[in-house]
Image (spheres, helix red, strand yellow):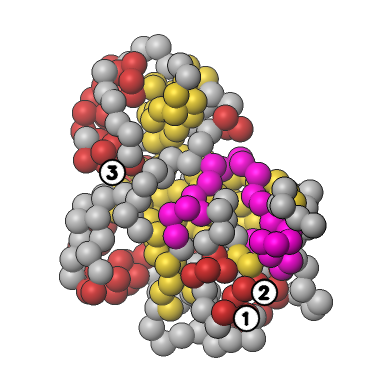
């Protein structure tokens, strides 16, 4: 099952579907939820009513909105693929490198991402597997982690490399408005055989840039959730971005940062595709 969101009947609504094309708006199933964590907590009702629904409606992917609404937190992992660490001149860490990506950065899977002065002159892309938490998790053992995952999505961890370098840390450089396109929907975990061997790709203006697999992660999904839950209580709706494979703009010589007009496409095997045009800030000089 997939959980998506779009404007229907004049308002943003959650929807449930099976094929990514035809959807049952939850409001028409007698369910009214405003935040992702509410959908998660009531997923049994959603499943039951979707199974009985007969009037599914088609929705174009471009009309979809972020399926993640008001998460408690977005946690991200840096340098979690060895070859990505190498291309940036770093070494893979001996424990997960965690940073926050603030919730204001959440953006729709096909929306325009705003860059350029005064936001950033060195915008970069990072395709990532996003994990959405389904149950409160505290001190969870690795072998128990599957019970705490609600689902998965595709994310682009957009980065301002100039801020990242000047600040000496990641959070501000990763958290500008529109810097976390995610979607195109949440695929419920039971529909994915395993998250440990999924292909990730990205392209810029149709040119392939990143290709990798989650099997190349330094720290896999189970390890990350167990590690995080040791000190941070994870709650339904929280998002974890799990790192990016090599091929980012910073890794080229010279670097190939994004310009207004560029279109970035990110995909994760079995989870869909997100596509975002990068546009100049309206406050650019």
Q: Is residue 269 visible?
A: no
Marks 2/1: CA distance? 6 Å
Q: x, y percentage for residue 179?
A: 57, 56
Q: Is residue 26 above or below residue 126?
A: above
Circle 1 Cα neighbour tier, 10 Å, few/some/many (<14 / 14–19 / ≥20)? few
Marks 1/3: CA distance? 36 Å
Q: Secondary structure at mark 3?
A: helix
Residue under label 3, please give it.
37
Sequence-first disc among 1 and 3: 3
Question: What residue do we see at 52% from left, 74% from top?
Answer: 170
Marks 2/3: CA distance? 34 Å
Residue under label 2, please give it.
162
Q: x, y percentage for residue 168?
A: 55, 83
The quarter of the picture where the N terminus appears is: top left
Kindly check if marks 1 and 3 are in contact, taking CB atoms under 8 A apart as contact. no
Kindly check if marks 2 and 3 are in contact, taking CB atoms under 8 A apart as contact. no
Q: Nearer the viewer, residue 245 or 41?
A: 41
Question: What residue do we see at 76% from left, 55% from top?
Answer: 284
Which label was assigned to residue 11?
Answer: none
| Residue 67 found in image quarter | top left
Q: x, y percentage for residue 204?
A: 74, 55
The quarter of the picture where the C terminus appears is: bottom right
> Relative to residue 218, is residue 52 drawn left or right?
left
Kindly check if marks 2 and 1 are in contact, taking CB atoms under 8 A apart as contact. yes
**Magenta residues, as a range?**
102-125
Residue under label 1, please give it.
166
Q: Is residue 261 above or below residue 83?
A: above
């Amino acid at each position: 099952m997939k959980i998506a969101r779009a404007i229907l009947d004049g308002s943003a609504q959650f929807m449930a579907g099976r094929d990514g094309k035809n959807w049952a708006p939850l409001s028409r199933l007698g369910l009214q939820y405003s935040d992702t964590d509410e959908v998660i907590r009531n997923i049994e009702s959603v499943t039951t009513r979707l199974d009985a629904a007969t009037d599914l409606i088609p929705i174009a992917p471009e009309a979809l909105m972020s399926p993640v609404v008001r998460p408690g937190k977005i946690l991200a992992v840096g340098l979690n693929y060895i070859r990505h660490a190498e291309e940036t001149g770093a070494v893979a860490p001996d424990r997960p490198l965690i940073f926050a990506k603030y919730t204001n950065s959440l953006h729709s899977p096909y929306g325009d991402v705003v860059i350029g002065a005064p936001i950033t002159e060195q915008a970069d892309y990072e395709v990532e597997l996003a994990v959405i938490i389904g149950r409160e998790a505290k001190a969870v053992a690795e072998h128990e982690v599957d019970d705490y995952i609600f689902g998965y999505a595709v994310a682009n961890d957009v980065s301002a490399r100039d801020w990242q370098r000047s600040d000496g840390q990641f959070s501000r450089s990763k958290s500008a408005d529109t810097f976390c396109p995610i979607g195109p929907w949440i695929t419920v975990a039971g529909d994915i055989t395993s998250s440990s061997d999924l292909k990730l790709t990205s392209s810029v203006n149709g040119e392939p840039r990143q290709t990798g697999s989650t099997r190349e992660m330094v720290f896999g999904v189970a390890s990350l959730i167990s590690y995080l839950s040791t000190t941070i209580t994870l709650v339904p709706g929280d998002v974890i971005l799990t790192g990016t494979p090599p091929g980012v703009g910073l890794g080229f010589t010279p670097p190939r940062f994004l310009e207004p007009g560029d279109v970035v496409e990110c995909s994760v095997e079995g989870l869909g595709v997100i596509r975002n045009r990068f546009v100049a800030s309206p406050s650019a000089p």
